[in-house]
Image: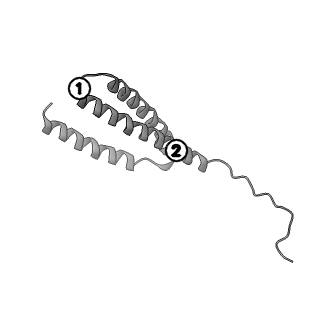
Amino acid sequence: MDPILALTLFVLAVFLGVELISKVPPTLHTPLMSGSNAISGITLVGALVSAGTEYSTLTTVLAVAAVALATTNVVGGFLVTNRMLAMFRPRTPKKDDGEGGSA
């Protein structure tokens, strides 16, 4: 593929991604993060398969980098999703220990 064409597609994808994500309402953020985590999991599997092939040293190095980045993305995504879901859990009231604060 021509490098100029690849760069053009990449820049257009970045602009499209920024526009789409900026239009997402907060209530849809958690379901979208779950879907994004699933896609990152697929990316992680593909990176592991690539790391297992022995085409060249460059392929192995890039595949190991892809495994590290995809793992970071998956773990970070699940941490963010867990934190977002924790915001929707009902709060438990604090137990009163029976002592009045005033004398």
What SS does tag 2 mark?
helix
Tell me the number on the disc at residue 79: 2
What SS does tag 1 mark?
loop
Q: Residue at x 46, y 36 (%)?
A: 37
Tell me the number on the disc at residue 85: none
Q: Nearer the viewer, residue 19 or 85?
A: 85
Task: Examine the rendered structure and indicate whether residue 85 appears above or below residue 71.
Answer: below
Task: Examine the rendered structure and indicate whether residue 53 appears above or below residue 84.
Answer: above
Q: Residue at x 28, y 44 (%)?
A: 14
Look at mark 1 in the image and give the residue it sits on.
56
Q: Position of residue 18 (x, y in %)?
A: 33, 48
Question: Mark 1 Cα within 10 Å, few/some/many (few <14, many 20+)?
Answer: few
| Three-letter amino acid code of the residue under disc 1 | Ser
Task: Examine the rendered structure and indicate whether residue 42 appears above or below residue 99.
Answer: above
Sequence-wise, the earlier of marks 2 and 1 is 1
Question: Mark 2 Cα within 10 Å, few/some/many (few <14, many 20+)?
Answer: few
